[in-house]
Amino acid sequence: MTASTAIYCTLLTALLLTSATAMGQTANVELKGINEVPTNASTATGTGSISVAADKVVSGSVATTGIEGRVAHIHTGAAGANGPVIVPLTKNGDNTWSVPPGTKFTDEQYAAYQAGTLYVNVHSAAHPGGEIRGQLQPK
């Protein structure tokens, strides 16, 4: 390999790594009653994705089935632990919840997102503390 080829490869690699970091991260999430604390036997489910851009602006949505959700949130908390609400989600129709436009994580919340210690929770009349839950594990 020539010196100019090696320099080109190094610069290309650096550019690709920088672009991936600048684009932010996305976490696909699967919500189930068994993930709740305490667990429940709900057959309701949910799927979605939450993205956080490099400037910590949050976007995304979750769709549910088999549940009449009353409220939904992003919470802090590791798997197996409950935590406080940090982002209330907006209901868009019967079964879809989205992050409100302009939502931005603090540095602490972003660090928790990267560490996988945030979760999405959908609450119902039958389970006011939360019927289905999914941990956010960004890629």
Image (tube, rainbow, N blue to C red):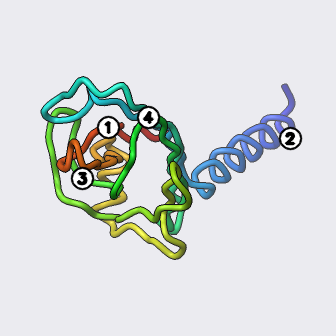
Closest to the camera, between mark 1 and mark 4, is 4
Q: Give how far across and how far down residue 43 sits, in percent.
A: 36, 25
> In the image, what residue type sits under mark 1?
Ile
Residue that appears at 35% across and 47% down: 120
Q: Would you place residue 124 above or below residue 81 in this image?
A: below
| Nearest the eye: 25 or 118 | 118
Q: Give how far across and how far down residue 128 sits, in percent.
A: 19, 50
- N-terminal of the pair, mark 2 or mark 3, is 2
Query: Based on the displayed image, in which of its 4 quarters is residue 35 positioned?
Result: top left
> In the image, what residue type sits under mark 3?
Thr
- N-terminal of the pair, mark 1 or mark 4, is 4
Q: CA distance from mark 2 to mark 3?
A: 48 Å
Q: CA distance from mark 1 to mark 4?
A: 10 Å
Q: Which residue is mark 4?
A: 66
Query: Based on the displayed image, in which of its 4 quarters is residue 38 positioned?
Result: top left
Closest to the camera, between mark 2 and mark 3, is 3
User: From this viewpoint, is residue 73 visible?
Assistant: no
- N-terminal of the pair, mark 2 or mark 1, is 2
Residue that appears at 84% across and 25% down: 1
Q: Which residue is mark 1?
A: 132
Q: CA distance from mark 2 to mark 4?
A: 59 Å
**Would you say the residues marked 2 and 1 are in contact, meaning their CB atoms lie under 8 Å apart?**
no
Secondary structure of residue under mark 3: strand
User: From this viewpoint, is residue 114 visible?
Assistant: yes
Q: Give how far across and how far down residue 81 sits, in percent.
A: 14, 39
Q: Which residue is mark 2?
A: 4
Secondary structure of residue under mark 2: helix
Q: Which residue is mark 3?
A: 76
Q: Give how far across and how far down residue 15 sits, in percent.
A: 71, 50
